[in-house]
Amino acid sequence: MRVEWKSCLRIGVSAFLLFLAIYYWQGVTNLGALFLQAAFPLAVGAGIAYVANILMSFYEKRLRLKNKWWQRLRRPACMALAFLTVVLALLLLIWLIIPQLVSCFQVLLEALPGAIESLYGWLEEHFNISAWMAQQAQSMPDGETDWESLLKNVVSVLFKGVGGAMNAVVAVTSSLVGGTISLFMSLIFAVYILLGKERLGSQFTRLMKRALGERRTGRVLDTLRVFDDCFHSYIVGQCLEALILGSLCAVGMMILRLPYSLMIGALVGVTALIPIAGAYIGGALGAIMVFSVSPVNALIFLVFLVILQQIEGNLIYPRTVGSSLGLPGIWVLAAVTVGGGVLGITGMLLFVPLTAAVYRLLGAYVRGGERGEKRAPSK
């Protein structure tokens, strides 16, 4: 067996780097965390570009004109239309939710004094709370109050509170400024990705072919296509399902003459983006809003939402999301549970398409093995 010095050098360098990584593990992890923190705006920009590309591709396919100027401006115009669509959707949600939410809080504040009075009357009737409060007042120690010490303590607490409040204001302001700058950088990075996505894809493919070879590059690209198809189908299907569910909820509440129909419909639609549990979260918040007006209407709303959820789960969701992903319900539940435990709501949103892609790849792997066994000659 012939041993080349280049192979030995590569093995030696790899072993030395592995030793350094293990010996200085804390520094390596700190450096990795710093790199991830610095690259976080770029990752967010890539995510924004991926979602915006769905709308941009939709506009590019349907806005095909033979005008020479339009051929040059089609990509920027479609990208602007994609971002404008997202902004208008957010403004519409704010317009639907905020005014009625303020109205609901006003109703709650107006009903609060009466509720406190009713609660005090119930406590007085069952526990004689006035006698208990008088007894507690009598048990307090008598004597002259040291007003000088009390004033010093009050001033000290006030100064500490002002200092803590100032620190909190500075921290919040710096977080807002930093978040705004990061979001701005993410948007710029997303714009660059969208404008040159074909060129970036070509460069990435050429780099993989050089590093991995033609055959392995084909396998990697096939795997990436599966993940892209699952995420694309999930985003489109989940948004369509949320729009249908929110519209049906708002229309149904209007027919039943329930309060806050538009706000609760928009809220149920937004929370429906979270698989399985999202609509129930929106329904619970909506029930609290309706309860502030009428407990009977809140009960009617809950019954209506349960019926709507059954229709959505058996008719709408399988056609809009389930059929496109091809993921059994038990794996959707597992993905939501694990994703929620790892990354919260973000994990719930990400783990469903990830699980669908892995499920599809494993299915293709198993079917390929079974076909290989059938082709194998019997002894």
Image (cartoon, rainbow, N blue to C red):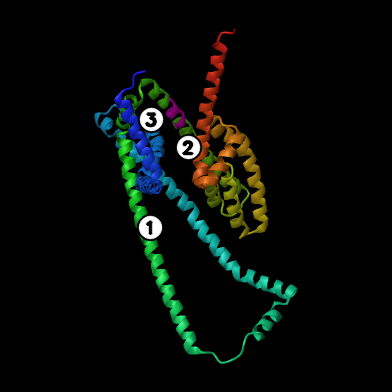
Q: CA distance from mark 3 to mark 1?
A: 41 Å
Is residue 46 positioned above or below 170 on the image? above
Amino acid marked by disc 1: Ser
Residue labelled with disc 3 = 62
Quarter of the image for the N terminus: give it.
Answer: top left
Is residue 341 positioned above or below 11 on the image? below
Q: Quadrant of residue 378?
A: top right
- SS label for mark 1: helix
| Residue at 55%, 20% in the rendered image | 367
Of 280 and 40, which appears nearest the observer?
40
Residue labelled with disc 2 = 235
Q: CA distance from mark 3 to mark 2?
A: 20 Å
Q: Main secondary structure of the magenta part?
A: helix
Between marks 3 and 1 in the image, the one whose residue lies nearer the viewer: 1
Q: Are marks 2 and 1 in contact (CB under 8 Å)?
A: no
| Residue at 44%, 77% in the rendered image | 158
Residue 38 location in percent, x, y?
A: 34, 48
Work out which residue is located at the far left of the displayed protein and give it: 69
Whichever of labels 2 and 1 marks the residue nearer the N terminus, that label is 1
Amino acid marked by disc 3: Arg
Q: Residues within 10 Å of mark 1 (few under 14, many from 20)?
A: few
Residue 225 location in percent, x, y?
A: 43, 28
Q: Are marks 3 and 2 in contact (CB under 8 Å)?
A: no
Of 14 and 167, which appears nearest the observer?
14
| Residue at 53%, 38% in the rendered image | 241
Q: Residues within 10 Å of mark 3 (few under 14, many from 20)?
A: few
Residue labelled with disc 1 = 175
